[in-house]
Amino acid sequence: MRLNPNVVATELPPLLELTATAERLAAEGRDVIRLDQGAVDVPPPPAFAARLVARLADPDVHEYAPDPGLPELRTALARHGHEAFGAAWDPAEELIVTAGANQAAFAAILALAGPGDEVLLPAPWYFNHAMALTAIGARPVPLRTDPDRGFVPTPDAVAAAITPRTRGLVLVNPNNPTGVRYPDHVVRQVTELVVAEGLWILADQTYHELAFEGGTALSPAAVPGADRSVVTVGSFSKSLGLAGWRVGFLAGPAELVREVLKVQDSSVICAPRAAQVGLLAALPDARAHAAKVRALLRERRDRLMTALRDVGLDGFAEPRGGLFLFLALPGHTDDWAFCRRLLEREWVAAVPGAAFGPGGGSSIRISFGSTPADRLAEAARRLARAVGRL
């Protein structure tokens, strides 16, 4: 069987092995603490389920939605985008509903880059973006970031990385896997540079509404010319607890959205209609609900940082949004081996930093999105034992 060499060269999702092992150990009765999956344990707003229950008997809820999404939901999303991101999207031409932010990002990458193109990713990077680029024959180019400076990419580093093959830059802010939030002035400077070079920016805003100290989103209105260059993707998996419903959005220039619709129709056709119906009911309360999730995550972040420092593990930049902390493991160069032993011996599941590309080695990513505070303290104690053992 002849396989696409670009797909063959793409790494398998790193969570597959860890998830299978964690589930096996839990089934055996082990007290497994899950710090691997990027999920929150807060249920969706009550209006989401209430609308679905009321509509499940309607035949149209079980049919395809229009490829770009329900028109009334796109209108509501445009309004939400203005409130949350300061954007001014035309819901008819510049916005589509997607099956989560991951599918939105893949569709955008497929429409914007091609074989041989280069796209800049601050590293450590979110592995699905790098996987998507590799799968289409493009090259993810790492922008190395300094953990001592908060993993923040600098305009000078961006300028130095641009070549004739560069097509764009991906920014996830707040960041996955590091949890840091890029300062507004840095985002603006980088955006001005990229726009001046005639490149595009894929702004993954999945965690924007979960930024602990607030801050400005990367809005196309913030920089002259950015409305032609910035593509925004977002998700309600974290802020509204809708991970399993697969509903997100993509917004950008109308000509790009038209091309993305080709990818949409030839892959998922449309985001699940039931999820769109429920989201339409939940959106009016979305920002208030996100505030509750944000407060819970901030409490867990604080408890986790304290617990790690109490056991002598302080090699991390302070997470300023989302649900991740990136912990350095000095002296442990094989973080895959460390995570396997951590899971098999201490029953704690975490993701090896090497899964997040260059600059991620000798580290682990910890998710505190679905773990109660007392369990985070116990996880820190087990981590300390594992570090000492190895």
Image (tube, rainbow, N blue to C red):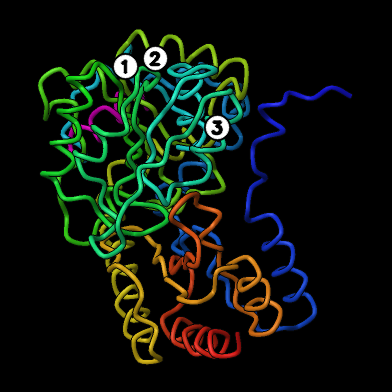
For the residues labelled 1 and 2, say whether their Cβ atoms are less than 8 Å apart: yes
Q: Nearer the viewer, residue 109 or 370?
A: 109
Q: Nearer the viewer, residue 46 or 41?
A: 41
Q: Secondary structure at mark 1?
A: loop
Which quadrant would the C terminus be assigned to in this image?
bottom right
Which picture quadrant has residue 311?
bottom left
Looking at marks 3 and 2 on the same chain, the residue that comes earlier in the sequence is marked by 3
- Which residue bears the numbered disc 1? 94
- Relative height, residue 208 to residue 37 (above, below): above
- Which residue bears the numbered disc 3? 132
Looking at marks 1 and 2 on the same chain, the residue that comes earlier in the sequence is marked by 1
Report the Cα–Cα distance between label 1 and label 2: 6 Å
Q: Residue at x 40, y 22 (%)?
A: 96
In the picture, the disc for residue 257 is 2
In terms of secondary structure, what is the magenta stretch mainly? helix
Report the Cα–Cα distance between label 3 and label 2: 18 Å
* Region in magenta: 72-83
Q: Residue at x 25, y 54 (%)?
A: 181
What is the three-letter code of the residue carrying label 1? Answer: Glu
What is the three-letter code of the residue carrying label 3? Answer: Ala
Please indicate whether residue 161 sits to the left or right of residue 363 in the image.
Answer: left
